[in-house]
Image (cartoon, rainbow, N blue to C red):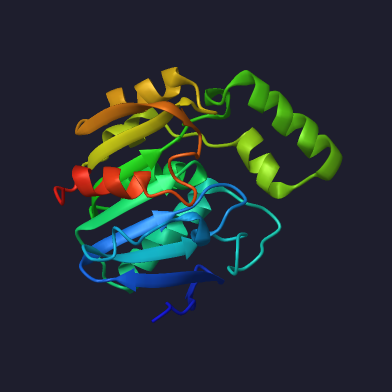
Amino acid sequence: MPSVLKQMNVNGIDLAYEVRGNGKPLVLLHGNGGTHKIFNTKLLEPHFTCYLIDSRGHGKSTRVPELHYREMAKDVVEFLKRLDLKDVTLAGFSDGGILGLLIASQTDRVTHLVACGANVEPGGLVLPFQIFTKIAYFFKKNPLTYLMMAEPDIRDEELAKIKAKTLVLAGQFDLVRKRDTDHIARCIRNAKEIILPGETHGSYIVHSDKLAKLILRFTGHQ
């Protein structure tokens, strides 16, 4: 039976989300400009109850004039509290990976974190992409683009607060500088870093089962 899109009001906005599968909770967070539909969950559904969320300003969630990672992270923390989800595996891609780092630094409800293609400050993106976003914003003034130009600003102390067992992922040809990926992994006590050969920023995630296989291995299901 196909899953049904649900809505939850948190922090004054409506978050759209789907629930799929059975088992311990797994929260999946998409990247900038995407929606929950990018994730292939078929391999995960026998092992996890998958919660696929559209971040504020994305998909079917409430549109807002400005976007900030810390507000988006607070939405998900409140989501976890409202559903009383514990022992959560959280996997986030790109902006979702940034949110995952912030969320895991703020709550013990996340016990396993998979951060894919995340950066901790705007300079963590490769230079050609930084230039591209500035040109794109000059012409279209899109708040999604501005978000990538102005944020995040995750401090080392925040990364050090993360208690979750963490897998830090990036593609060999990622949009995030390897030094930023390395830095994140160094700052988190229980982190393992994997650079995926031949992969780009989203090639192993968007409509792919590769991320699912990595999550299953990381959580001991394979």
Report the side of 22 relative to 98 (left or right): left
**Where is 28 relative to 203, above or below?**
below
Relative image position of residue 204 (x, y in whole percent): 43, 40
Report the side of 55 relative to 82 (left or right): right
| Residue at x 44% of width, y 29% of height | 171
- Write down the quadrant of residue 126 in the picture: top right
Residue nearest the observer in this picture, 205 or 114: 205
| Residue at x 62% of width, y 51% of height | 33
Relative image position of residue 150 (x, y in whole percent): 63, 35
Q: Which quarter of the rendered picture does the N terminus lie within? A: bottom left
| Residue at x 29% of width, y 58% of height | 43
- Write down the quadrant of residue 165 in the picture: top left
Relative image position of residue 108 (x, y in whole percent): 23, 52
Q: Is residue 191 visible?
A: yes
Q: Is residue 103 visible?
A: no
| Residue at x 58% of width, y 53% of height | 34
